[in-house]
Image (spheres, rainbow, N blue to C red):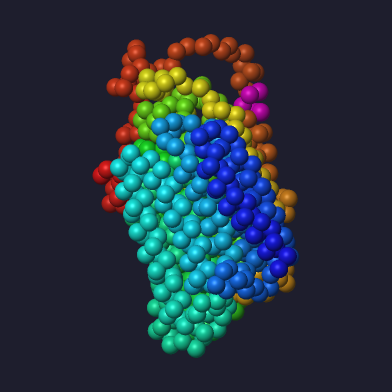
Amino acid sequence: MRLLTPLFLAFLILAAAAVLSAATARARRFSGWLHFALAVEAAAFLVWTGIRAAAGHGMEEAVLVRLGPFVVPFLIDGLAGLFLIVIGVVSAASALYSVRYMEYYAGYSLRGYYFRLPLFVLGMAALVTIDDLSIGFSLAWQIMTIASFLLIRFETRVKAAVRAAGRYLLLMELAWALIVGAGILLGGRAGDSLHEIGLKAAAANPAVLAAALALLLLGFGLKAGVFPLGQLWLPDAHSAAPSPVSALLSGVMLKTGIFGLIRIFFFLAPAAGPGFDPRFWGGLLAAVGTVTLFIGTLQCVKQSDAKRLLAFSSIGQIGYIVLGLGAALFLSASDEPALAGLAAAAILGALFHVLNHAIFKGLLFLTSGSLLYATGTKDLNRLGGLVKWMPVSAVLAAIASLAVAGMPPGSGFASKWTIIASTLLAGQGWVLLVPFGIVALFTSAVTLACYVKFFGLAFTASGAEAAAAKPIREVPGSMLAAKIGLAAICLAQGLLPFLFVRLIAGALGHSVGFAMGWFFESGAWSRAVGASASGLRIESLLGPAAGAAVSPLLVLALLLLALLLGVWLRRSAGSRERAVPTWLCGYQTLNESTRFTDRGMFAALKNLFRWTGGRTSPKE
């Protein structure tokens, strides 16, 4: 009960932010700072609540709260705490970034923007703390969906944005209907918690249970953006929205779908008893995740619009998370302690990637906003050389690009490595997961190609000065501050992964009803997954060679040593430096015909996988 007070205070502050910021929207910058002040206060309450819950001070069972004529169950356990932390951090960064970024939309009133943005955050926070599939869930879902729909169509004069928002609203309402329908099918009534619905599911016909779980997978999968459902709405919606909204859509909102999948398959379904087969549903989730990460990432490499590239990349990264969840569910069905240890590694990797993706993808979407703000375009073919004018943004973009590509010691490396290693090591017990791990490993290389392209064409290739609509300069300090904050967290996640793995393990151990809760509550997970300042180690216990380890700090030390060695070798030769114009492959002047463009980058790879599709613009 104690955690409900700060949660409701956060809700109240967000509601006040919506009203007060909208009321003062004529003073555009004042309204932005007012919104930020209230949003960061609400975020502090959300993060504090989340940390307390993850540390073991959360609820052990749902608490009924009367909201007007309705009674709604709230549950703030360790799992909900993790997602509240994510919501609080990214929403605060987006609020700070919005203050100056929204100057780009000088022709639009900000009243609607500042009214909807805090309600969007409120809806997401409510969704991860309300513990039913009926009235409370519907209320939170509709606040989140309608607010985000109106934010996506903020540029009402752009037909593509209006179409994308309409498609998004239609599909999100379909997802809501599927989820609520599944709850009704299982016998759930208004006010029933997920635990109570799970107990009713135990008495359900196996065919009815399977149908309900399929509906829930479709509903939450549609929200999370898994293949092929994500392709129906995600690229167009994320690229149409203002960049701070895109950061919330990709960094946070997609994770509400992941949260739903965890609640269903690791809390509700196991309570149904023998009618639930974790091997079947785990294998299905792992297969869906593998296809999603493979197709989404290959579609990503074909994009030339910066925000569409990031949007397709989000689909691919969600695939890694779903693969980890599926592998954990599949392996948890085994009586072998070794495989149970790998199940723990897989769920830890999946949730670690939730935290990582929220930060680095939020940072990348804010970076895409900086490109648009500084140059007036998101087209990578019309950018290039921005490191000269935007050096701070370039460094921050490089940090995020290394993280999402899974390059050590970037944050994505540790979480992807944990997911992939758990699937490959499982091959000594269950060969089924090994092909999924191999595909995921290959796709990591494709992800690197995507971000070599993103960073290279935007910041290091030549030519933005020939295409920019206005003089190029670094973005304002408040926009940089928001990105620097996210980049600092990103670096901490990459260099000190053990802190976050322990946080996640503690949160799962304090989530009553979690199918693998005993493994985390007893501390048995630490025998299979070593997490210390020296790095991470997975020990499957299946044999003397069945283990894998990684040390981000050691990797960083080796990289620095190699850099110092390179500097010493260059100086030892006594060579002199001289400044010369950029070589244009024999051409004398820079123009559109002599610039390096997207068409030639990874052309063979794109041609080989052309069958994977992936529209490159909303008009196609």
Question: What's the residue at 62%, 74% (across, down)?
Answer: 64
Question: What's the residue at 43%, 88% (across, down)?
Answer: 205
Write the start and end of the magenta stretch as one range: 564-568
Question: What's the residue at 43%, 26% (across, down)?
Answer: 375
Viewer-side residue, 44 vs 51? 44
Query: Compared to 454, does 472 lie above or below?
Result: above
- Image-quadrant location for residue 350: bottom right
Residue 582 pos. (x, y %): 43, 16
Query: Compared to 233, does 566 lie above or below?
Result: above
Question: What's the residue at 47%, 39% (across, down)?
Answer: 110
Viewer-side residue, 300 vs 9? 9
Residue 378 relative to residue 330: left or right: left
Q: Is residue 175 magenta?
A: no
Residue 260 pos. (x, y %): 51, 66
Residue 230 relative to residue 401: left or right: left
Q: How would you classify the magenta stretch by its main secondary structure? A: helix
Residue 185 pos. (x, y %): 42, 80
Viewer-side residue, 614 vs 10? 10
Q: Quadrant of the N terminus?
A: bottom right
Tell me if residue 131 can be seen.
Answer: no
Query: Compared to 612, does 488 lie above or below?
Result: above
Query: Compared to 557, does 344 lie above or below?
Result: below
Residue 37 relative to residue 169: left or right: right
- Image-quadrant location for residue 306: top left
